[in-house]
Amino acid sequence: MSAHSTPSRRALLQGAAAVPVVGLGLAGCSTEGNRRAASATPTAPVELGPEGEVAKGTTKLFEEQKVVVTRAEDGGLTAYGSVCTHAGCPMNKLEGTTLICSCHGSRFDATTGEVLERPATVPLPEVPVRVEGGRLVAGPAEA
């Protein structure tokens, strides 16, 4: 082929097939979502409400604070950020102990943060949670 000739349809299609998926921007979606999910977790103490807000053996989603809290039967507390690690969408649906992302359908176990259903592949970030003065508080302790 000379410098001025037009490539054949076959040559164009073969070249397009060689373009990596990363070049299309699809692989970066999860990485960006991970950054947004981590940055959406509380960076300072956030009051969630009275200690009794989450009864033993239950899980509660605090949409405004973007945190989901579980209290085990023994009274132990765990919390996770409730921003999807796939594309950074705040989750607003909790069915039992399953957090559901309305953007792309990812599902997470709210008691462990683990992914139950893709497209998300990275678990939810754990958030410190404790009781202070009879109130539930999420986020790092004040220094």
Image: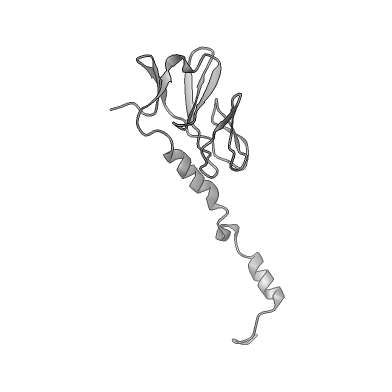
Q: In this view, which residue lies farthest toward the top?
A: 74
How many marks are shown on the rendered structure?
0
| Location of residue 5 with respect to 102 vertically, above or below | below
Q: Residue 118: give x, y in percent of width and height.
A: 63, 40
Give the quarter of the image for residue 107. Answer: top right
Image quadrant holding the C terminus, namely top left
Of residues 16 and 47, the one nearer the viewer is 47
Quadrant occupied by the N terminus: bottom right
The structure's colour scheme is one colour
User: Residue 85: horizontal and vertical position, in percent?
Assistant: 52, 40
Q: Which corner quadrant of the image does residue 123 belong to?
A: top right
Q: Nearer the viewer, residue 49 or 29?
A: 49
- Whether residue 79 sits left or right of residue 9 in the image: it is left
Place of residue 136 in the rendered image (x, y in percent of width and height, measured from the top left): 41, 20
Q: Whole-percent x and y of residue 69?
A: 49, 24
Instruction: Work out whether 129 lies above or below 14.
Output: above
94 sits to left or right of 66 = right
Residue at point 46%, 14% (across, down): 52
